[in-house]
Image: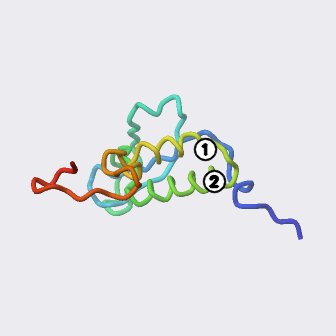
Amino acid sequence: MFTLSPILQKSKSKRLTVTLVSAAQTGYLYATTKSPQKAEFRMALRKYDPIVNQHVMFYETKLPVWRRQIKRAIERRHARATGDRMQELIQRVTKGSRARPAAKFNKGGQPTMPNKVGSFA
């Protein structure tokens, strides 16, 4: 049987997924897509909210933090598997906290001890 990898099964659509939250603050939400050209504009639609049993305004909100983390993880996994956008990942790692300044090491490569004030001499 012919199967495709998860990367090949994904949609190639450039449309952005957005979440619409009810203005009635019932917690009910809709998920829809919009054009990337309209990404900077906040979407507002009048839709039916079954909790209050009437039509109310729904406003676009940001994705929850855990959804953004999942999206970033998927993008990283795709980049590692295909080599796509690898330079961006390398730049992030070298600029991040993993890069140690050379001043904290002596000539032998061993960390120096801090002086009484707490800074490295």
Give me the residue at 53% from left, 34% from top.
36
The residue closer to the viewer here, 103 or 74, is 103
The quadrant the N terminus occupies is bottom right
Q: Secondary structure at mark 1?
A: helix
| Residue 63 appears in the picture as rendered | yes
Q: Which residue is mark 2?
A: 80
Q: How many marks?
A: 2
Name the spot of residue 49 as percent of width and height, x first.
37, 56
Give me the residue at 52% from left, 39% from top.
34
Name the spot of residue 8 as percent of width and height, x first.
74, 54
Furthest residue to the left? Answer: 117
Give me the residue at 50% from left, 41% from top.
91
Name the spot of residue 56 as percent of width and height, x first.
33, 48
Q: Which residue is mark 1?
A: 86
Q: Residues within 10 Å of mark 2 (few under 14, many from 20)?
A: few
The residue closer to the viewer here, 103 or 23, is 103
